Amino acid sequence: MKQIKIVIRPEKLNDVRDALVKIGCFNGVMISEITGHGSQQGLTQTWRGEKYTVEFIPKMCLIMVVDDKDVDKIKTAILESAPTGDPGDGKIFISNVEEVIRIRTGEEGTEAL
């Protein structure tokens, strides 16, 4: 099993969700609003003639735990639906999950997903 953490632009959430639904991999997802910055180090904007810097940029974070066999199609769906071509499009983090237990039933492993 793998945990996939996806950080994307807020305006791309519906596109990513639709792509994951289309491939049948939108079960058991956690979604959070987050802020942060990567290599772009925030944004400089102008409002009423004054420049100001937005240091932390709003993003969406999706976290999923999936079966190993679904990882490649999830990566492909995200890479096709999330990019704008500009800096700050986001990241995908994939890590191993040693164990999953469904609290209600006590099921373990992929049955608990």
Image (spheres, rainbow, N blue to C red):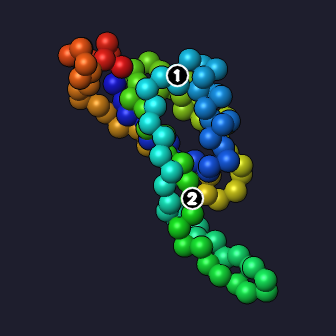
Apparent side of residue 101 relative to residue 18 in the rendered image (left or right): left
Which amino acid type is marked by label 1? Cys
Residue sticking out furthest to the right: 49
In the picture, the quarter occupied by the C terminus is top left
Residue sticking out furthest to the front: 104
Separation of marks 1 and 2 at Cα, in angstroms: 25 Å
The first of marks 1 and 2 along the sequence is 1
Residue 98 screen position, x and y as percent = 23, 29
> Which residue in the protein does label 2 denote?
58
Residue 57 screen position, x and y as percent = 57, 63
Closest to the camera, between mark 1 and mark 2, is: 2
Q: Secondary structure at mark 2?
A: strand
How many marks the image carries: the answer is 2
> Which residue in the protein does label 1 denote?
25
Can you say whether 55 is above or below 12 in the image?
below
Residue sticking out furthest to the left: 106
Residue 19 screen position, x and y as percent = 64, 28
Q: Secondary structure at mark 1?
A: loop
Tell which of 107 and 20 is nearer to you. Answer: 107
Can you say whether 103 is above or below 36 in the image?
above
Residue 12 screen position, x and y as percent = 66, 43
Which amino acid type is marked by label 2? Pro
Q: Residue at x 52, y 64 (%)?
A: 37
Is residue 10 visible in the rendered structure shown here?
A: yes
Can you say whether 9 is above or below 75 in the image?
below
Q: Residue at x 79, y 83 (%)?
A: 48
Tell which of 79 and 111 is nearer to you. Answer: 111
Q: Residue at x 29, y 31 (%)?
A: 97
Q: Tell me whether circle 1 and circle 2 mark residues in contact (CB < 8 Å).
A: no
